[in-house]
Amino acid sequence: MRIAPDTAVVMTTHDGELFVARQIESILNQTLLPAAVTIVDDASRDNTLSIIRDFASAAPVPIDLVRVDGSRYRNAKTRVTDSVIHGLDSVAHDAAVEFVLLSDQDDEWLPDRLESQRELLSGRSDALLVAADALLIDANGAALGGHLRDRFPIPEGWERLDPAQRVRAAIRRPFVTGATCAMRRELVPLIAP
């Protein structure tokens, strides 16, 4: 078992009992494990917390559970963003953490996601964030056909855009989903509201 001492995972959950076990398993079955996993749970009322605690008791790396209540937010995206920011804040204070990978509760990672994204970031000191494509699956983990990139295509002419034009393009239409991202810790304070 290989562990990346400079890498952490932040996952958000809310009533995710149908998915969370498969996602935690996929994180713990990586070719390179994170040093720690922080799971931010937003007031789950199902068995999500007990599933997380069961994994935490036997995991080969620490799994930290952070509980929040985002019910004050009317907008679901704002609620999820708040959970992500809580998770990023909790790992960003660890001086050993240089890279952070994001995860949703209903993801299932390919076995080399952490290793390949960490390698991309560590090989490019000018890169603050990398994002991956993803295979689309149903609630049971069966392939639906197609990729996440099909639903969130890269803007046309991206390679020809200067940095300011790229920021404007990204604000107009998202083409990167948070759960496919890995970032350097130094990006965390720049993305927090």
Image (spheres, grey):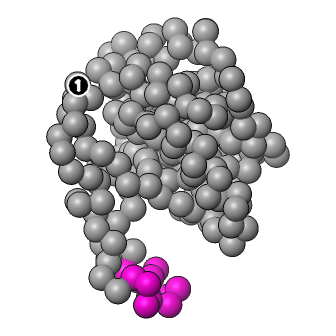
Q: Give the image quarter of residue 104.
A: top left
Q: Quadrant of the N terminus?
A: top right
The secondary structure that dominates the magenta segment is helix
Residue in the picture at 57% in, 62% down:
129
Q: Give the image quarter of residue 61.
A: top right
The answer to whether residue 139 is magenta is: no
Q: Which residue is under mark 1?
A: 140
> Where is residue 152 shown, x and y percent of the image?
28, 63
Q: Three-letter amino acid code at disc 1? A: Asn
> Where is residue 105 shown, x and y percent of the image?
39, 32
Q: Which residues are magenta?
A: 158-169
Residue in the picture at 59% in, 33% down:
31
162 over 113 or under it: above or below = below
Q: Quadrant of the C terminus?
A: bottom right
Q: Is disc 1 placed on a helix, strand or loop?
A: loop
Res. 44 in view = no
> Where is residue 173 shown, x and y percent of the image?
30, 72
Q: Give the image quarter of residue 153.
A: bottom left
7 over 173 or under it: above or below = above
Q: Is residue 60 left or right of residue 192?
A: right
